[in-house]
Image (cartoon, rainbow, N blue to C red):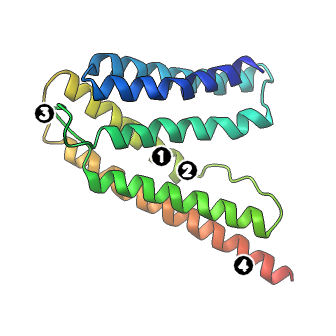
Amino acid sequence: MTSANQLTILRMASVPFFVLLVVYNYIGGALMVFVLAGITDLLDGLIARQFGQKTQLGTLLDPIADKLLLVSSFIVLSIDGLELTLKIPLWLTITVIGRDILLVISVVIINLTMERRLFPPSIFGKATTFLQLLTVFAVLVLSYLKSELPSVNLLFYTTFALTVISGLHYLARGMKIFGDVEEES
């Protein structure tokens, strides 16, 4: 169990605390947990690369930890009954989760019907993850400050657009893999 993997597991373990803090309206605490989870994400990757701690377990756990944090954040920050100054629109949450479900199903189908493949993130995927994290961070900060910022809607629409674009891009990559395999047959 490398220190990079331990940081990834710590990030996964922080998710229930983050959700509870938001639900019980401890937004400052939730913001702190979210920022610390982001720091562990940066550190685990840096440690894995710099100190030769890349492992198959880490390769599997890191994206799972990221998705757990993001999906949980989007869901809890969309709940109507909570006392948040600003909520993530439900249509954006559904889009984010829908894209992730589509990606997981595609990867499972490809890995079950062909040889095992890894799917490194594309530039669109990385940009989408960054915008999704920024969206959660902005909603947490604005809710903590009990402030509204009309321009945050631009962030919601941009996150939506890039989420759709990256989902279509990954879908096209998956279809290309199927096409390449059929040409070889």
Residue type at mark 4: give it.
Gly
Residue at the spot x=70%, y=25% of the render?
5
Are there few (<14), some (14-19), or many (20+) residues within 10 Å of tag 3?
few
In the rendering, at what x and y percent does residue 99 appear?
47, 58
In the rendering, at what x and y percent does residue 170 appear?
57, 62
Q: Looking at the image, is 48 positioned above or below residue 116?
A: above
Say which of marks 4 and 1 sits in front.
Answer: 4
In contact (CB < 8 Å): disc 1 and disc 2: yes
How far apart, in angstroms, are the residues tagged by discs 3 and 4? Answer: 48 Å
Write down the residue under mark 2. Answer: 123
Of pointers 2 and 4, the one earlier in the residue sequence: 2
Write down the residue under mark 4. Answer: 179
Write down the residue under mark 1. Answer: 127
Q: Secondary structure at mark 2?
A: helix
In the rendering, at what x and y percent does residue 172 appear?
58, 70
- Whether residue 107 sits left or right of residue 20 in the image: it is right
